[in-house]
Image: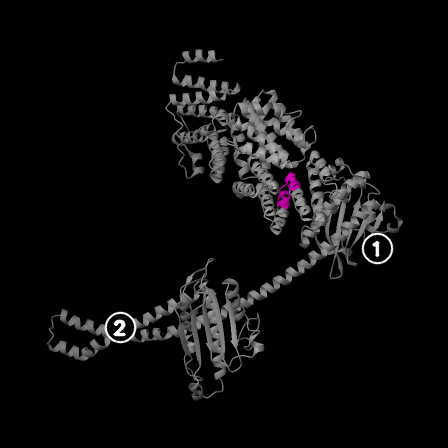
Amino acid sequence: SKALADIALKQANSLFDRLKIYELQIQYYIAKNERKKAVDLGIYALKLINIELDGISPDVTDIEALADLPEMTEPTKIRALRILIATVSAAVIVAPDLLVPIASKMVNICILSGNSKLAPYAYGFHAWMLCSSLGEIETGYRFGKLAIQLLEKFNAKEIKCKVYQQFNVFVRHRKEPLENMKELVEAVQSGIEVGDIEYACYAAQDYCILQFFLGQNLEISLQEQKKYLQLIRRNQQDFSFSFASPWVQLVSNLLNQSVDRYSLIGNFFDETLKIPVLQETNDHISLFPLLFIKTYLNYLFGCYELAVDNAISAEKVQAGSNGFIYYPSYLFYFSLALLACESRSTSEKRQTSLDRVNGHQKQLGCWMNDAPFTYQHKYDLVQAEYHRVLREKLEAIELYDRAISGAKENGFTQEEALANEIAAKFYLDWGKEKVAAGYMQEAYYCYARWGAKAKINDLEQRYPSLLGPILERQKLGFLNSATITNVTQGTISPTTTATGEILDLATLMKASRTLSEDISLEGAVANLMQVVRENAGAETVALMLFTEQVLMLTAVVTAQGACQVEPIVVETSHSVPLSMIDQVKRSQKPLVLENASNETAYAGDIYIQQHQPQSVLCLPLLDHGKLIGILYLENNQVAGVFTSERVEILNLLCSQAAISLENARLYQKSQDYTEQLEQTQLQLVQSEKMASIGQLVSGVAHEINNPIGFISGNLDCATEYIQDLMDLLQLYQQGFDWNSETTQDKIEEIELDYLIEDLPEMLESMRQGTNRITEISKSMRTFSRSDTIAKVPFSIHQGIDSTLLILKHRLKANELRPEIKVVKNYDDLPEINCYPGQLNQVFMNILANAIDALDEASEGKIYTDIEVNNNCITISTRLSTDKKSAIVEIADNGPGMSEQVRSKIFDQGFTTKGVGKGTGLGMAISQQIIVEKHGGTIDCISALGQGTKFIITVPLS
């Protein structure tokens, strides 16, 4: 072959022909697993056409616009792309440092020379590098979508397999669920169709890996893996076969099909033969996943130190692997193994491990941010273990449950099982064996649903006491591993009657948990219908609930699926046999009929006549002896479905269902009441806001009227003066001199001397008026400034002064009393970090209340008597002794208040004002602003006849 290539090269007529031959040689070297030669030849061929792998990153802002580039026409550039593409798969193994420069070069060629059928690969490979090596996930994903778009535009079947493989394996799972990677099957088919065997087998190997991570039953995974492994074997792709085989062996181990569950030795792979070869050839890209799998198996089966050792070995060869779907799982299990070893570590080693875990969590957090549906529960489980190590039990408890919930919600059965198992160990170490048993039994059923028989056996050997109820049922012959696996699938036939195999402990636990999952009434109803439909062997299920003592048909589920109904009175519906419902309603006891259509007692029931049901079960829903509803079940296909055992278990479920439904109903009522209270409070707060706005508007109107009136009044006079001066100037323009009779008459007419004296004074007073308006406007802005999310520096004195300015019209003398004097004793205060608008609202509430109190005290008094002991408000500010807080005291010499009134002054809704004059929220809101929003204090000191003082303390920062 090399000889043939040499002959062809000698006979090549042009550089372009030689490049074609070099491309074929690269492919030949890869097929012969001589990857270093393939890479060297690729670099050599590129140099012949002056292309260097300079590593210059593409300068692109509008990625989507690249789809509209003109078509590439230079044959040399197209050939360069072909050589770069041919070199990639070899560089992945032997020269990973060249991958980013190769990707950059391909994209830069496209940008400069246009798009072609090869452009999708260029953009797709660049997307891979952005996501895996450069950490630019969003940009990488956009390049990946661009690659898929251009595949369709150019109908580029030749490279579809390559692009699909790269996008799905290295890009898609960073932003989409793993389930979407099943498109790899299409990549395999596309590669086979066009003869791209190499990449078809890469896609096949990656599909085999994906099977382990999906969370589906392992028997299904193994069947899929074997099919695609055989395809790889048929096409003699040794690298892909070696890469995929460990993952098939892993699944085989978990299915308990190997002698040694800790090692990858079995029908599909033998690590003792393969690992030395990979180490000798420095095939790190293949060695890393092998060491990860060994990390996983050792951790799963409790050999934590070995798991850590394997993970550390993997760390040394991880270069080039951080874009595969197994890399975040490697971080996940490495961290769990480190934390599991914590109790046996020295304090120094323990801190090193915790630092390492923090580093892993930082990386896993990046994956989680872009794909929380895949990685959030992993992150949470590691955090739970981290808090366990730090003895922070409450934090750990919340995170264990969050990890379990997240894994379950997103279909990762294997990690739902693991999280339950780890939580069980946590509670067991804490001495809470009953709680631990619940979690461990749930872990057992999850592993069973996953099909991990080897792990089930492991749990049975390690925790027989926690799994006692399950193991006891196995001894009695009611339950075996096969039954558990089938039961926990939740695929129960309506016609099955072997209750020992169906309604076992697994189903009961699962159903019980489902019933308690949702507190809303709608959710509780849905959960009940789901549980009964799955586990009762019924074709039709109807739920009836009492609403204000009337039995209402609430929901119906048939064999064809859920039929949602608007609640209707049972007596007017035709969905249930009324005679049976009435009987259960009266007796409050279950009614079981093996073949209802043959029962003469109900032969007159219209429903029975029309539908001829066979098995019927009617159950009362009782909460503390009170009938809250009735559950009706029927099966039209088989008689005697509802055996005594099944009825007994359904009774248990109905007891819990009744509690859940009643709790949900009470919760719904509380939500309704809460909503009403919130609306009422909202209206009250709005009233308080409107009252503040009223104070503001009234104050501004009073303060601004005087200068506006003054300016307006002077404008007319100033206009006349200016007109007179203009008339005088016009005489000069017409040629009249100063001493002329006409000019002197005009001077006398306009009283020029007085005008010269009066106009400047008039303009000055108008300027003072505009300054006053500006000052009022500034004060208004200070008072009413809107608060941001964060606190900002603010002068308390400016806030008080702006509030006083707005209230100035209320402080002035009127026909009932003299002016209220304001005394200000301001110390030097620095600006404080606060919400200025809210603080100003507090000042407004206190000062307005003080003015109200002084006005009220002045009623009925003689004007001159009030002048002797003048109404006064004193405002003092100072720093606290520790210099960390500002203190504001606002006191009045009004009538004061009794202790009974003072003690309620901050109560919401309490007011001393007449009907329609106060909301009772002002001081309550003020306390909330000072205490909750600013972390300060507000106190009221008062006694009858001695005035009132409010003392406010606000931290400076």
- Indicate the position of residue 921 as horizontal and vertical percent values: 54, 70
842 shown above or below 511: below
Q: Is residue 366 magenta?
A: no
Q: Position of residue 465 (x, y in %)?
A: 75, 43
Q: Residue furthest right?
A: 600
Q: Main secondary structure of the magenta part?
A: helix
Q: Quadrant of residue 812?
A: bottom left
The answer for how far apart the CA atoms under marks 1 and 2 are is 98 Å
- Asked if the residue at tag 2 contacts the one at tag 1, i.e. Cβ–Cβ closer than 8 Å, the answer is no
Q: Earlier in the sequence, mark 1 or mark 2?
A: 1
Q: Amino acid at mark 2?
A: Leu
Residue 300, image x, y percentages: 65, 36
Q: Range of the magenta residues? A: 403-418
Q: Tell me if I can see residue 330 in this picture.
A: yes
The picture places residue 437, in percent across and down from the top left corner, at 72, 45
* Quadrant that contains the C terminus: bottom left
Q: Which residue is mark 2?
A: 763
823 with respect to 295 (left or right): left
Q: Residue at x 75, y 36 (%)?
A: 481
Look at mark 1 in the image and give the residue it sits on: 583
- Of 575 and 940, the residue lying toward us: 940
Give the class, few, some or many, for how many residues have Cα within 10 Å of label 2's Cα (few <14, many ≥20). Answer: some
Relative to 713, residue 574 above or below: above
**Residue 575 visible in the snapshot:** no
Q: Is residue 331 left or right of residue 495?
A: left
Residue 416 falls inside the magenta stretch:
yes
Please name the amino acid that badge 1 sits on.
Gln
Callout 2 secondary element: helix
